Image (tube, rainbow, N blue to C red):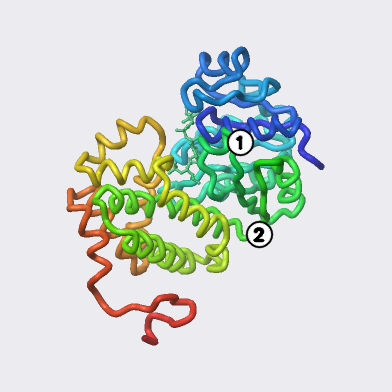
């Protein structure tokens, strides 16, 4: 069934953007948020003054503080809150959901207990609702200005994929499909770590060759980790892999990059996060991925170096420098395995 009525849960930057695309596509869309003043601004002035102050939102977009107004009767419910709040939000909406209403996560993070991705949390709490994940190079502030962008809808359910492609595709937003839900979702979470590292590199004034080396070795490291976890390495060649890694590692619009940049300039992690005032998922993801890599003996020098900088006060210069030492390595491990060098 096509998506005629949609709910978006979460009134931050990305939730507002997704809701606005749906509204631009003439879909009856309600965005749920806790903040009453922001909801009133969206309904009366058609702006989200806290997260997207310069953007005129589609006047048909409705904001509410009542979950039932958003969720009841929606064909699709998009979840767009930080990963630490996804379980809490799902527990609130679960009693209202009916079988078949699609659940789509736009959240790029990991739940530490059990190392769960958001679709796994959705499947655990709402097993009767088909699950999908939206991920790609999607800086909210650019899409809000209706600058051209593309994304990936990943799901094992082909109806869900097609319906979301139809609901979100428009003159400025293109939606590609994937059936590797796990790979797409893991890649969206992992790239945030490397955006922080790229922020250090930029703040330290390192060269363009260094930046390219960091991004490419980040791709090698994140795909090595993902394959060890069971993902398809080819997924990392797509928009949710290379695409999102490149944009997040190169743009000062990325919050994760900004946190890394501030630390590279000498700020503490606490100062950098406080100054940002929005979510930078990579900080927690770094902790969880480092623990998993140590537990599973996965070689991740950038993750290990970034952890030392963020949590043990090491000099950010050591992270890039750390790549220059150690064993001789393979460029593309899927072509030349590490143990065959
Ligand atoms: N901003 C982007 O460019 C972008 C793009 C793609 C994906 N994402 C991902 O989307 C997710 C959300 O990011 P964002 O940029 O919208 O974050 P944000 O910081 O702009 O907004 C988060 C929103 O979630 C709300 N929220 C937090 N906890 C809540 C709870 N318990 N109940 C209800 N609401 C709660 C906050 O009040 C806020 O409105 C993140 O995982 C992020 O990685 C962001
Ligand atoms: O601002 P960031 O670092 O959370 O990145 C936003 C999006 O994930 C980019 O695709």
Name the residue furthest front. 208
Residue 75 is situated, as x and y percent measured from the top left of the image, at 74, 36
Nearer mark to the viewer, of 2 and 1:
1
Q: Residue at x 52, y 55 (%)?
A: 243
Q: Which mark is residue 39?
A: none
Name the residue furthest right. 1
Q: Quadrant of the N terminus?
A: top right
Residue 194 position (above or below residue 104): below
> Does residue 46 appear left or right of residue 269 in this picture?
right
Q: Quadrant of residue 308?
A: bottom left
Q: Residues within 10 Å of mark 2 (few under 14, many from 20)?
A: some
Residue 1 position (above or below residue 338): above
Q: Residue at x 65, y 46 (%)?
A: 127
Q: Which mark is residue 179?
A: 2
**Distance between the alpha carbons at the discs numbered 2 and 1:** 27 Å
- Circles 2 and 1: CB atoms closer than 8 Å: no
> Does residue 126 appear left or right of residue 157 in this picture?
left
Relative depth, front residue between 135 and 200: 200
Q: Residue at x 38, y 54 (%)?
A: 194
Q: Quadrant of the C terminus?
A: bottom left
Q: Which mark is residue 146?
A: 1
> Does residue 135 appear left or right of residue 271 in this picture?
right
Residue 272 is situated, as x and y percent measured from the top left of the image, at 28, 37
Residue 53 is situated, as x and y percent measured from the top left of the image, at 50, 23
- Is ligand 1 less than 8 Å from the beta carbon at label 2? no
**Label 1's element?**
loop
Residue 289 is situated, as x and y percent measured from the top left of the image, at 37, 56
> Does residue 177 appear left or right of residue 284 in this picture?
right
Residue 281 position (above or below residue 286): above
**Label 2's element?**
loop
């Amino acid at each position: 069934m096509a998506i005629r009525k949609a709910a978006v849960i979460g009134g931050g930057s990305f939730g507002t953007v997704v809701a606005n695309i749906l509204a631009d596509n003439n879909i009856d869309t309600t965005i749920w948020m806790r903040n009453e003043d922001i909801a009133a601004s969206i309904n009366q002035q058609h702006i989200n003054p806290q997260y997207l102050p310069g953007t005129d939102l589609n006047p048909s977009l409705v904001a509410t503080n009542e979950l039932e107004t958003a969720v009841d009767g929606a064909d699709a419910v998009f979840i767009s809150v930080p990963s630490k709040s996804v379980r809490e939000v799902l527990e609130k909406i679960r009693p209202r959901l009916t079988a078949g209403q699609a659940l789509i996560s736009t959240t790029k993070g990991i739940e530490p207990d059990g190392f769960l991705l958001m679709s796994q949390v959705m499947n655990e709490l709402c097993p009767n609702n088909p699950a999908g994940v939206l991920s790609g190079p999607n800086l909210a502030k650019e899409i809000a200005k209706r600058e051209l962008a593309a994304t990936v809808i990943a799901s094992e359910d082909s109806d869900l994929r097609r319906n979301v492609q139809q609901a979100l595709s428009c003159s400025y937003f293109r939606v590609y499909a994937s059936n590797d839900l796990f790979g797409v979702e893991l890649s969206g979470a992992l790239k945030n770590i490397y955006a922080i590292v790229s922020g250090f590199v930029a703040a330290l004034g390192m060269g363009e060759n260094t930046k390219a080396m960091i991004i490419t070795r980040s791709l090698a490291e994140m795909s090595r980790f993902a394959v060890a976890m069971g993902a398809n390495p080819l997924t990392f060649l797509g928009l949710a892999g290379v695409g999102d890694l490149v944009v997040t590692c190169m743009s000062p619009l990325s919050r994760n990059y900004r946190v890394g940049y501030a630390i590279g300039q000498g700020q503490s992690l606490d100062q950098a996060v406080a100054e940002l005032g929005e979510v930078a998922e990579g900080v927690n993801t770094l902790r969880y991925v480092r623990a998993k890599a140590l537990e599973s003996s996965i070689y991740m020098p950038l993750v290990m170096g970034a952890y030392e900088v963020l949590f043990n006060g090491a000099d950010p210069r050591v992270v890039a420098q750390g790549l220059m030492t150690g064993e001789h390595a393979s460029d593309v491990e899927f072509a030349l395995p590490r143990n065959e060098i």
